[in-house]
Amino acid sequence: MRTTLAMLIVLSLYACGGSDSRNSNNQDSLSAKDSLKKQLAEDLPPSTDPAQFEWIYSTFVASAVTDAPRFNVFINKEHGLWIINSNGALPQMVNVKDIAGIKNSKGDSLVPMDREKMVCTPKSSGWPEKNCDMPSGWSITGCYTTEQNKLRESKIWEYAGLSDTDNKNVTELAAGITRAVVNTEMNMTFYFTEIGGTWYLTFLDLRKPCEA
């Protein structure tokens, strides 16, 4: 059952809905995908089980390498997605509810993301740390996942010049992070939160190590 649901949702994200489908029908189709994503999460083991996250992450990757509407399925309508970047030593944070128009470090649209670099199976042992003596800027390279809430531990938002309201909202949202994935090929860290039985991407760190 789990395998069937996982395959169905991944295929639905790739199928019907190419360039000709990005029209007024998107809202209905995304609503169906969101429901299926929730069904998938409910059918799988608790969120502490790595198997559940493996399915969810593969579905997210399928969305991220496709287009903005599919990516947006993973953005919670109430809390949005906090994107972390930097222009110098201090971090910058912006909240979005639509990934369309967001640029990467090269000035290109962030989504769709590079398929070859995004497709990976996160390892649960080890975690890349900043290491400016390494060519990549990371202590180890690859794709890794952890339940350790490193964003909450860093409290990076305290240095981003947020308003009191935003600071409070980020503090509360960061406390609920369920899983994190770092992809050193992409120089991105993805933070996922389970909200109301559905998985969402709540924080996305685009900062490259050793560039400050």
Image: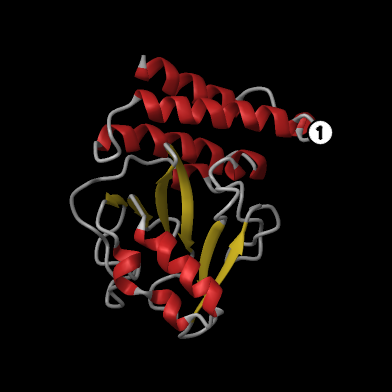
**Mark 1, residue position:** 24
Q: Considering only vertical position in the picture, is 109 above or below 60? A: below
**In the displayed image of the protein, which residue is found farthest to the left?**
125
Q: Residue at x 61, y 26 (%)?
A: 32
The coloring applied to the image is secondary structure
Q: Amino acid at mark 1?
A: Ser
Residue 71 placement (x, y as % from top left) = 58, 43
Q: Residues within 10 Å of mark 1 (few under 14, many from 20)?
A: few
Image position, residue 7 (x, y; %): 45, 20
Q: How far from the left and from the top, in percent, is residue 210?
A: 38, 78
Classify residue 134 by image quadrant.
bottom left
Q: Is residue 201 left or right of residue 124?
A: right
Image quadrant holding the C terminus, namely bottom left
How many numbered discs sit on the rendered protein?
A: 1
At 33% across and 67% down in the image, what residue appears? 152
Label 1 element class: loop
- When asked about the image quadrant of residue 35, the answer is top right
Q: Nearer the viewer, residue 203 or 208?
A: 203
Side of 64 where 151 appears, left or right: left
Q: Quadrant of the N terminus?
A: top left
Q: Residue at x 54, y 55 (%)?
A: 79
At x 61% / y 50%, what residue is drawn? 111
Is residue 18 visible in the rendered image? The answer is no
Asked if one can make out residue 174 in the rendered structure from this viewpoint, the answer is yes
Q: Nearer the viewer, residue 48 or 167?
A: 167
Which percent across, then down, holds residue 8?
A: 50, 19
